[in-house]
Image (spheres, rainbow, N blue to C red):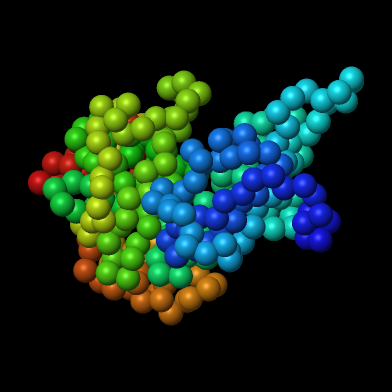
């Protein structure tokens, strides 16, 4: 860290999200223009320059001198995350690490790898790993009229409510960009919602939707597999999840096309 501290840092900011304070410093002020869109939903300026964690970004705004092409460098604490010529790659790694750090360190929320949508005043929770088809199902639900809560984390408070975490969706096969709920013809939820249904599912070509009701114990075990971290406060995490599965219906099934299952879920929750 001492070597990093001796470098010339021309700009910086301190932000807070979900009770976690993070500092970000950069080698020139223009670098921060890339940072603002990548900050976690609901962030606000920290009230103090004292932070829990520090990121350091060295982003090159030119092609260097002569034949020397400069690297973009990103440090998470003292760990180098990126050393690349590709600015988008450097920023992608920074964004993921920043969001994961907040998910791991948030003192009063439980972050679950899950999509979440709002429907008739309650949230439908869709836990699942990358590659399970979660994003397509979330997008189909939003297109069918549900409000968008998140496609990355379902952020639960101690009351079991899901807070909006509306990062743009990435939908493979629908272009390289990211999609907002509004771009999908839907809307973004603005307030936390109590959970009304937990759906454990993943895409399998040709699969029929045959949901099996889970007991509270089964649902708790399944849900715990998708919690980002239990190390910092296991009693809080287990207590929050236990109370949630004790009162909320949970089902599990493989699924086929997202649009068909989205309609079934919304009709069942009328």
Determine the residue positioned at 43% across, 79% down. Answer: 235
Residue at the bottom extreme, as displayed: 235
Q: Is residue 212 above or below residue 218?
A: above
Residue 240, picture quadrant: bottom left
Q: Is residue 45 above or below residue 52?
A: above
150 or 23: which is nearer to us?
23
Taking the image as shown, residue 73 lies to the left or right of residue 121, namely right
User: Can residue 259 be seen?
Assistant: no
Residue 246, picture quadrant: bottom left
Q: Position of residue 259 (x, y in %)?
A: 27, 31
Residue at the left extreme, as displayed: 270
Taking the image as shown, residue 190 lies to the left or right of residue 222, namely left
User: Can residue 194 be seen?
Assistant: yes
254 or 159: which is nearer to us?
159
Q: Position of residue 147 (x, y in %)?
A: 24, 41
Q: Position of residue 119 (x, y in %)?
A: 18, 46
Residue at the right extreme, as displayed: 67
Q: Position of residue 39 (x, y in %)?
A: 49, 46
32 or 146: which is nearer to us?
32
Determine the residue positioned at 56% across, 44% down. Answer: 95
């Amino acid at each position: 860290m001492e070597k990093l501290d001796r470098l010339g840092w021309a700009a910086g900011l301190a932000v807070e999200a979900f009770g976690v304070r993070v500092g970000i410093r950069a080698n020139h002020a223009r670098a921060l223009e890339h940072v603002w869109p990548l900050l976690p939903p609901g962030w606000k300026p920290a009230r103090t320059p004292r932070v829990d964690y520090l990121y350091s970004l060295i982003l090159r705004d030119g092609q260097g001198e002569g034949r020397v092409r400069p690297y973009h460098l990103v440090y998470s604490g003292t760990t180098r995350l990126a050393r690349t010529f590709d600015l988008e790659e450097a920023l992608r790694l920074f964004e993921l690490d920043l969001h994961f750090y907040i998910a791991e360190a948030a003192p009063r929320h439980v972050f679950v790898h899950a999509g979440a949508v709002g429907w008739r005043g309650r949230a439908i929770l869709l836990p699942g790993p990358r590659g399970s088809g979660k994003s397509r199902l979330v997008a189909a639900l939003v297109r069918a009229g549900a409000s968008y809560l998140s496609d990355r984390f379902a952020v639960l408070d101690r009351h079991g409510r899901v807070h909006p975490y509306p990062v743009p969706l990435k939908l493979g096969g629908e272009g390289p960009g990211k999609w907002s709920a509004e771009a999908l013809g839907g809307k973004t939820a603005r307030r936390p919602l109590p959970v009304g249904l937990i759906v454990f599912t993943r895409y399998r070509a040709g699969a029929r939707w045959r949901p099996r009701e889970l007991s509270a114990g089964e649902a708790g075990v399944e849900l715990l597999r998708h919690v980002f971290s239990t190390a910092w406060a296991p009693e809080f995490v287990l207590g929050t999840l236990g109370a949630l599965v004790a009162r909320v219906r949970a089902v599990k099934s493989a699924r086929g096309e997202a649009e068909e299952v989205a309609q079934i879920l919304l009709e069942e929750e009328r």
